[in-house]
Image (cartoon, rainbow, N blue to C red):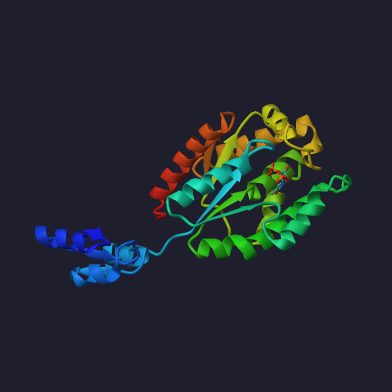
Amino acid sequence: MIGDTAGDVKGAQDVGIASIAALYGYGENSEVLAQNPTHAAETTQDLCDLLCPDMPEGKGYFVTLEGGDGCGKSTQSKALAERLTQFGYTVRRTREPGGCPIAEEIRKIVLAKEDGGMCAETEALLFAAARAQHLKDVILPAVQNGEIVLCDRFVDSSLVYQGMARGLGLDWVKEINRAAFRDGAPDVTLYLRMDHEAAMARRLAVSQPDRIEQAGDSFHARTEAGFETLYQQEPDRFLAVNAAQAPEAVTEEAFGKLFERMVKGGVL
Ligand code: TYD
């Protein structure tokens, strides 16, 4: 019996079971303690330690969200963060390019509309540089701290946009990213799958496109095909979600698939 009143403890004693006084509740601590509970917990963490002494330390988890421009990643990241927080997880939302001050500076350069002459190699190297800083400053410390990191885009975006759509090749993009950082593979990637034309129409209804979003229909058709290719290559890491549904339905599907994976992976 876990309770914060003397009556709770007495009830446990009457039926012959152990009791834990929850000292963080609304009840008067002196009263509940005067009833001689079997144990007392000052915090919910004390309660966890009493009930599950062998439970492993909270394990962090690195989740990326990927998909074409306009597929709704930011909306879904926000909704998923709310859900996971309700379940008691500590969630860190972040995004690429950016997520920390130095990487946000790189973001301004790489997405600026006036930088139309930027070559594909510079673009890919800037994304990798921003990622190295972001991993070091934000993602790895948060995961180490037991947090669930939800990152809007990551290295798969470089593989698709620079490697496939810009034509630099998957191997070259993998190589520069390997050179930029060692650790940091996502545990799981939510792939918001959607037709690129419908996604772009949705994106343009919200605000002006950035330099990469302005790249034209055939470029975005290649990104759509690129994400499909990565998904076929690593069907276990990618959790595909139908992003063409209403936002609430997308959240339901994404959360269901993510949570199932987290439970299987022992992310408590
Ligand atoms: P952003 O405004 O964050 O768009 P979105 O909400 O669609 O993520 O802009 C990021 C743009 O940068 C987007 O068009 C994809 C592109 N991008 C790359 O080309 N390579 C990368 O490695 C990353 C992280 C993003």
Which of the two residues, 262 or 43, is positioned nearer the viewer here? Answer: 43
Which of the two residues, 239 or 139, is positioned nearer the viewer here? Answer: 139
Instruction: Check the image and report above or below for 223 versus 106.
Output: above
In the rendered image, which quarter is residue 65 located in?
Answer: top right
Q: Residue at x 74, y 45 (%)?
A: 162
Q: Residue at x 19, y 63 (%)?
A: 9
Indicate left or right for 85 with 15 as reference.
right
Where residue 105 appears, as percent x and y from the top left, is 77, 58
Which of the two residues, 185 or 201, is positioned nearer the viewer here? Answer: 201
In the rendered image, which quarter is residue 163 located in?
Answer: top right
Where residue 249 appears, as percent x and y from the top left, is 51, 32
Instruction: Check the image and report above or below for 44 versus 259.
Output: below
Quarter of the picture holding the N terminus: bottom left
Indicate left or right for 131 with 4 as reference.
right
Indicate left or right for 29 with 70 as reference.
left
Query: How many labels were placed on the picture?
Result: 0
Where residue 116 appears, as percent x and y from the top left, is 88, 44
- Residue 122 is at least partly visible in this image: no
In the rendered image, which quarter is residue 41 located in?
Answer: bottom left
Q: Residue at x 47, y 44 (%)?
A: 258
- Residue 41 is at least partly visible in this image: yes
- Quadrant for ligand 1 reads top right
Quarter of the picture holding the C terminus: bottom left
